[in-house]
Amino acid sequence: MMILVKGGTFQMGSPTGMADERPVHTVTVDDFYMDEHLVTQAEWKKIMGENPAYFSSSPKKGESQTKRPIEHISQYDVFVYCNKRSIAEKLNPCYVIKGESDPKKWGPVPDEQNDAWDNAECRWDANGYRLPTESEWEYAARGGVHDGQKKAAKDADENRSWNKNNSDCMTHSVGLKSSSVLGFYDLFGNVWEWCWDWYDCYMPGEFVNPRGAERTIDNTDRIGRGGAWNAEASDCSPYFRNCGSPASRYNFIGMRVVRSKK
């Protein structure tokens, strides 16, 4: 199920956080839909025909294997999943690689960083599935309010996150922790969530629907948000920023999809 996040203007970042969480800056985002939970292994397999997850067996007693989040997927893999799912549901796919939106025409997914895949375009006006921008993710995580620090702090406690203190070194079925103020599950912990943006420092100012920095020789990592089963509890917050190569596959990085509201 997808939840409508009403757009608005908020103060992104944290004045007391890590250096890359500053400066706090003004961001406006449009309405968008976000999936209430992380993409599960069952949902991934339905579209992709296989389950690449590292945690593909032996769930914790009483939990469902198929409802564990997908992980061990690169951002390139995510582009394929999103467009395949969009096409399967008769929606307009968002991602374009080498001028094509049909993943069948993209060739094999690279195992190493690749210029053509790094230069993927996103059709923001398409109604298909895509990754959230970093600003969309933080806006939703903060509760969709102008100054979400009070509510967001409540969301980041251990009633709402699987982290290194309580995860038993594994992922867990989605939806077992309490939901966020907007009704989302596992925004904090379980697995990091790929976002669209290239990683870079924040800049002061006012921004409308920012989509991140340009890729450069020094900017080769994409953003991940939310924390994971092996992360410090303090990293499972609306503000903490992580990043990784879009070609990398780790057992602590997964995804959640969004759709533009048109």
Image (cartoon, rainbow, N blue to C red):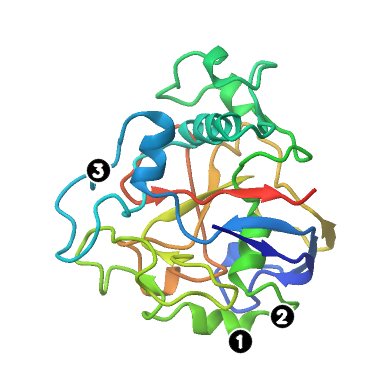
Question: On screen, 255 above or below 174?
Answer: above
Where residue 3 sits in the image (x, y, percent)?
62, 62
Q: Amino acid at mark 1?
A: Lys
Q: Does dot 1 land on a helix, a strand or a loop?
A: helix
Corner quadrant of residue 45:
top left
Q: Earlier in the sequence, mark 2 or mark 3?
A: 3
Q: Do the CB atoms of the residues marked 3 and 1 lie less than 8 Å apart?
A: no
Q: Could you say where residue 21 lies in the image, as x and y percent from the top left?
A: 61, 66
Secondary structure beneath label 2: loop
Name the quarter where the N terminus is drawn. Answer: bottom right
Do labels 2 and 3 touch, CB within 8 Å? no
In-image side of 82 versus 171 (left or right): right
Disc 2 from disc 3: Cα separation: 37 Å
Identify the residue under disc 3. 54
Q: Residue at x 38, y 81 (%)?
A: 159
The residue sitting at 34% across, 41% down in the picture is 72
Q: Looking at the rendering, which quadrant does residue 121 occupy? A: top right
User: In this orientation, which residue lies closer to the viewer: 214 or 253?
Assistant: 253
The residue type indicated by label 2 comes to Asp
Above or below, comparing residue 215 to residue 132 in the picture: above
Q: Nearer the viewer, residue 132 or 181?
A: 181
Q: Which residue is mark 1?
A: 150
Q: Are marks 2 and 1 in contact (CB under 8 Å)?
A: yes
The residue at which mark 2 appears reads as: 147
Q: Position of residue 257 (x, y in %)?
A: 56, 48
Say which label, 3 or 1, has the lower sequence index: 3
User: Is residue 67 left or right of 76 when viewed as pictured?
Assistant: left
**Within 10 Å of the Cα at label 3, are there few (<14), some (14-19), or many (20+) other Cα atoms?**
some
